[in-house]
Amino acid sequence: MKEKLKYLMNKKAFHISMLIVIVAIILFVLGIIVLQYNIEGETNMPFVLNKIAIISSVEGTDKEAGENRWAFDISQNNDINLYIEKNKNYDKQEAIKSILIDNIEIQRNSEKGKINFYRPNTTESGVYFKNVEENLVQTIEYKGAMKTDLKKLEISNQGGLIMFRVANDKVAEYFSNEDEINHNELLKKANITVEDLKSKVSMDITIKIESGKEYKANIVLDLPVEGVIENGTSSQEITDTSNIIFKRIKN
């Protein structure tokens, strides 16, 4: 029996078969690792997306009223707040170089209005956003700095807040001869429905670190927050960000 085993082990075919088995095991293990990474992503990043806050609101902009007392172009705004925090479990010193939001895409059923993206307003004090042409963006990048300054598009290099706006501009017009206008009711008065406003916004977020590492994830948000038509303003906080998978794209 021993002689037979020795004879088999000396056969070329046996060595080839063993090599194939070893390669198959290695590929299987690598496949499991890749699959786990695709599901879980980076599990120990230096900075993490801790929370997303969305504030949906209605805005009426005065326009030529003609024979009417009041006339408004109505926009429905969604202010997106992303909170980036230092990972307490990361044991190395790192600093944020920049945070990029790009590849912004939107899916919607209605053609009412026009979806635009805005950076924080650079001029008026106390006004975070203004839907004007100079604030229009296709991508937005916050640079790492000593402290967060939204108007300068700067975020503290140890974590902070970044903001931008997704707006449905001129989703409706409203004319009235009433004595007073409650702006919170403009969407309702203009007979705008949830289906007119509903959209799904997808974007990529890339966190770039001074050491050269870069991490990217895709974020998908359903807009607007429920209740904006009835109340004029509604908000939502997303604290479970486990479904947002960051992957390292640069070492």
Image (cartoon, rainbow, N blue to C red):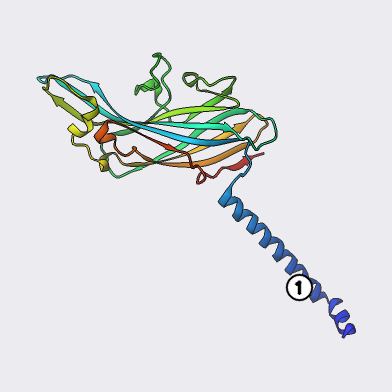
Residue 186 against residue 241 in the figure, above or below: above
Q: Position of residue 151 (x, y in %)?
A: 46, 19
Q: Three-letter amino acid code at disc 1?
A: Ser
Q: Secondary structure at mark 1?
A: helix
Q: Position of residue 147 (x, y in %)?
A: 56, 20
Q: Which residue is mark 1?
A: 17
As drawn, which residue projects farthest toward the bottom?
1
| Residue 183 horizontal side relative to residue 163, left or right | left
Q: Position of residue 29 (x, y in %)?
A: 68, 60
Quarter holding residue 92: top right
- Image quadrant holding the C terminus, namely top right
Task: Name the residue at 50% across, 46% down.
Answer: 243
Q: Position of residue 32 (x, y in %)?
A: 63, 58
Q: Nearer the viewer, residue 182 or 63?
A: 182
| Residue 50 horizontal side relative to residue 20, left or right | left
- Image quadrant holding the N terminus, namely bottom right
